[in-house]
Image (spheres, rainbow, N blue to C red):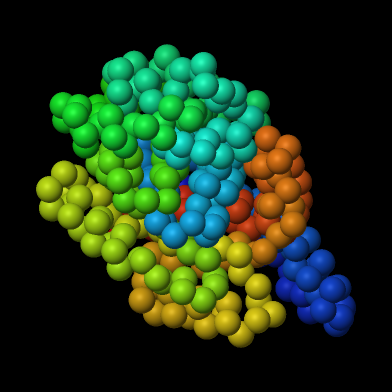
Amino acid sequence: MFHVKQSEKAPSNESFGMDTPLAREIADLSARRRALEGVSVEFSGDTRILTVSNQKGGVGKTTSAVNIASALAGLGAKVLVIDLDPQGNASTALGVPHNADTPSVYDVLIDEFPLAEIVQPSPESPNLFCAPSTIHLAGAEIELVAQVAREHRLRRALEDYLADHPVDFVIIDCPPSLGLLTINAFTAANEVFIPIQCEYYALEGLSQLLGSIQMIQKHLNPGLHLSTILLTMFDGRTRLAQQVAEEVRSHFPSQVLDTVIPRSVRVSEAPSFGQTVIAYDGQSAGAIAYREAAVEIASRQTQSKEK
């Protein structure tokens, strides 16, 4: 799909001659910033559709969806975020209006509005777009039950949109449940992207989610696969976080990104300003980590095509 090139290797911490933990952390962050400055990505025009899902709330699902989208846009990708969560947090973080009167994903799913009529540009980047959610989406689970082809409505709307508005990535932010909204997302996507919090019970409910993915593969979307797992809210000072990371990597060695997202005040603050952390403080540890994760997603795709 695209190629990732990285400039000369970033210097190690030792080269800075600093031996305090804070100094090492600052030196490491500076080296990672410089390494990111040397990254370039070329896109071929193929579209990857990723559904970001985890039925467990509070794992950084929406945060990861919007920040990966913003980071990819910063690399030059054209990105569409579809907000399928009735809370509308992804729309908020991308600075997109989503009051009750705003045309939204609800109108696409229930009234068959063209997706192009509801998509809005995000003020963060000319490459970043959002199909917003509104409070009306809360009732869509019930209303979809009576609809024809209820599992395929988002897929068909997205196919029509992409025919005239090609993008490099579509990122679908799901509600923290396994209802018809999430099934629509799974049916429309190629890939499943699961953020997992580095806390106790991190894998709780994951087996049910994987079972749902298998059912979608069998009955609705054979091309769907779990491609990416991102470890979030990582605190390297605790043994628990390290144990959780090791356990997840042992279960999913090829899906887990090497990049982990640290606990970060900046990441938590950004949504209250209607921004991603990439726009709010692009030089912070959280922003650097999301930018690295975005580059890794790109490079992994390149590697898989070369094999």
Q: Is residue 6 visible?
A: no
Q: Quadrant of the N terminus?
A: top left
Pinpoint residue 187: horizontal percent, then vertical percent: 25, 41
- Depicted 156 relative to depicted 46: above or below: above
Position of residue 142 in the picture relative to residue 3 (left or right): left
Which residue appears at 52% of the width and 47% of the height? 62
Pinpoint residue 232: horizontal percent, then vertical percent: 56, 63
Q: Quadrant of the C terminus?
A: bottom left
Pinpoint residue 7: horizontal percent, then vertical percent: 64, 55
Q: Which residue is more in the foreground, 269 or 68?
A: 269
Which residue appears at 68% of the width and 56% of the height? 286
Position of residue 27 in the picture relative to residue 201 (left or right): right
Which residue appears at 20% of the width and 58% of the height? 214
Q: Is residue 303 visible?
A: yes
Quadrant in the rendering for residue 167 = top left
Position of residue 256 in the picture relative to residue 29 (left or right): left
Q: How many marks?
A: 0
Which residue appears at 47% of the width and 50% of the height? 298
Q: Which residue is more in the foreground, 14 or 245?
A: 245
- Depicted 110 relative to depicted 221: above or below: above
- Depicted 275 relative to depicted 238: above or below: above
